[in-house]
Image (cartoon, helix red, strand yellow):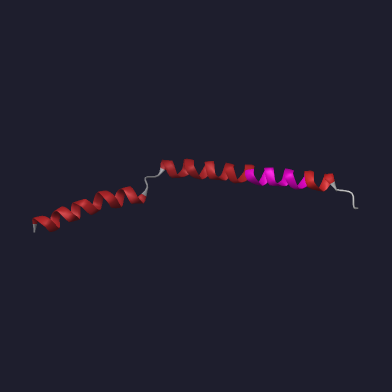
């Protein structure tokens, strides 16, 4: 039976942790950038009822 290579397993776990941490950091950085700019769906939602009112008034 072969011996398990614990060093390799530890290295793989460390790399996975590092990748997950970096992904989380990027997600947080993107969330702050998105919160500073107004979202387009909100702008579209406010414009849609206004056009609907114009159509019903006509």
Q: Residue at x 34, y 51 (%)?
A: 41
Question: Which SS type dominates the magenta stretch?
Answer: helix
Percent of width and height locating residue 30? 50, 45
- Position of 31 with respect to 18 (left or right) is left
Percent of width and height locating residue 1? 91, 53
Q: In the rendered structure, does residue 16 fall within the stretch colored magenta? A: yes
Q: Residue at x 24, y 52 (%)?
A: 47
Start-end of magenta stretch:
11-20
* Quadrant for the C terminus in the image: bottom left
Q: Residue furthest left?
A: 58
Q: Residue at x 68, y 43 (%)?
A: 17
- Position of 39 with respect to 21 (left or right) is left
Q: Residue furthest front?
A: 1
Percent of width and height locating residue 45? 28, 50
Q: Where is 56 relative to 21, above or below?
A: below
Q: In the rendered structure, does residue 46 fall within the stretch colored magenta? A: no
- Position of 41 with respect to 33 (left or right) is left
Near-viewer residue (11 or 4): 4
- Position of 30 with respect to 43 (left or right) is right
Q: Residue at x 53, y 41 (%)?
A: 28
């Amino acid at each position: 039976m072969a011996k398990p290579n614990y060093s390799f397993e530890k290295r793989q776990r460390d790399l996975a942790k590092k990748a997950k941490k970096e992904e989380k950091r990027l997600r947080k950085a993107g969330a702050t950038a998105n919160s500073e700019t107004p979202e387009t769906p909100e702008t579209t939602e406010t414009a849609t009822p206004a056009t609907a009112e114009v159509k019903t008034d006509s």
